[in-house]
Amino acid sequence: MTEAAPQTGRIRPRSLSDVAVVTVAAIIALYMADLYLRKLWSLGPDGLSGLSKTLPYWDFSNLWGGGRMALDAHVGLLFDVDAYRAALRGMFTPNLPNQEWSYPPSILLIGAPLAALPILPAYLIWTLGTIVCLWLAIRPLKLGGAAELAIVLSPAVIWDAVFGQNGALTTALLIGGLALAPRRPVLAGVLFGLLTIKPHLGILVPFCLLASGNWRAIVAAVATTIAIVLATGLCFGFDVWTQFLTQTRPLMTAIMEAPFPQHYHANAITVFFTARALGFGVTAAYGLQAIATIAAIAAVIWLWWPDRRVEHRERVVLTAVLAILATPYGYTYDTIGATVAVALLFTSVSRPPGLVLAACWLYAFFAHILNNAGFHVGVLMPSFLAGWMLFSIWVRSREADMLPAPAARI
């Protein structure tokens, strides 16, 4: 039997400075959350939010509106930009700014049931439900109640709710699947299959499963993906997949490659977007992103190789951080995995300074301010966390390899 990876057991005792850092960070976070949420739900005469300049449901209005069109048998509108925008304005308000349908059709399996409800209760169910999913996913990591609370109420989660986005759900699927992979590979594969609603966040998953030889999870993930594709086609017509590949995917690629800066770049946090901010062209930015993606793939292969001396929860959390670096398309609401890393590191003896971790935890609230001021440093946050964790694991792994093997029992 393979020897279990050593538990870190390096719990840092709480100090007065730790309490002070946590208290100050919590006060700042509560103040910023109150500020943003109040502004988000302060509606003008046109019914639009004072913060987002669109509906207060923000991106959730796409999921709900697209689901409503699907229920009304007008799913084809999703793939015609002008018709889709006109349909949304007909649903909500003629003053609605331009919005685009950007999701794989499979997310309609969630959006359509939600669209059977009025948008406000649907938004509340979506937001609270995805946060509960996140909490359930991090429970197996055994971080403790305080750390779990710090994650589910973190700025990244609040910002995800402000945007009406799916970061809490996708993080739950990724971390939940990775955490369960060794013990319950079939359930893990199902979660990975569900993650295809945002496939670019699961780039590293196949390499984790291949490196660890987890064939049952691979088969379950493939089977779940096929089942989702078939279910989507049976419910909404199989041509939605053709339309997605020929209309939606090129549209989203064009949006990603648009001249820098665009208003949505304020919350961008990937190597690709950082390279664009530094003046690199699209080709060069893709080249730098490719280097980051290959480095992340190499890191997870090393992490998930059998008999690697690393605590499983560290492997899981580090992979979630590396997932941010592996994709060219990611925003602050996709950095919830980095928040989980901060919570894990804060209790560790070998950790960055508390103030640095607090800055990483709070970063989602300030990213757009820095980006709009010309300081496009967002990718440094996940890069720093990934680098620190990877180096710490490597050092401990080297030290463990140098220890004499335990004597065999007679």
Image (cartoon, rainbow, N blue to C red):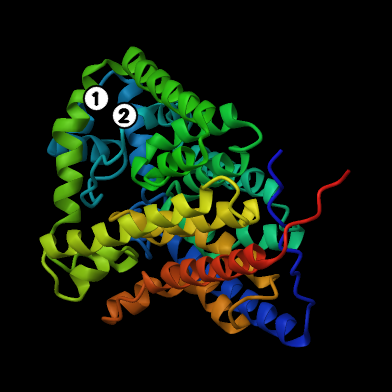
The mark nearer the N terminus, 2 or 1, is 2
What residue is drawn where x is 72% and y is 63%?
404
Which residue is labeled 2 in the image?
105
Mark 2 Cα within 10 Å, few/some/many (few <14, many 20+)?
Answer: many
Instruction: Name the image quarter holding the N terminus.
Output: top right
**What is the x, y in percent for residue 97?**
23, 52
In the picture as drawn, the residue positioned furthest to the top comes out as 234
Amino acid type for the residue under numbered disc 2 = Pro
Looking at the image, residue 336 sits to the left or right of residue 279; the answer is right
Can the viewer see residue 161?
A: no
Amino acid type for the residue under numbered disc 1 = Trp
Which residue is labeled 1 in the image?
241
Q: Quadrant of residue 29?
A: bottom right
Can the viewer see residue 189?
A: yes
Rendered view: 267 above or below 172: below
Quote the CA–CA distance across marks 2 and 1. Answer: 7 Å
Instruction: Name the image quarter holding the C terminus.
Output: top right
| SS category of the residue bearing label 2 | helix
**What is the x, y in percent for residue 154?**
58, 63
Seen from the viewer's position, the closer of residues 349 and 402 is 402
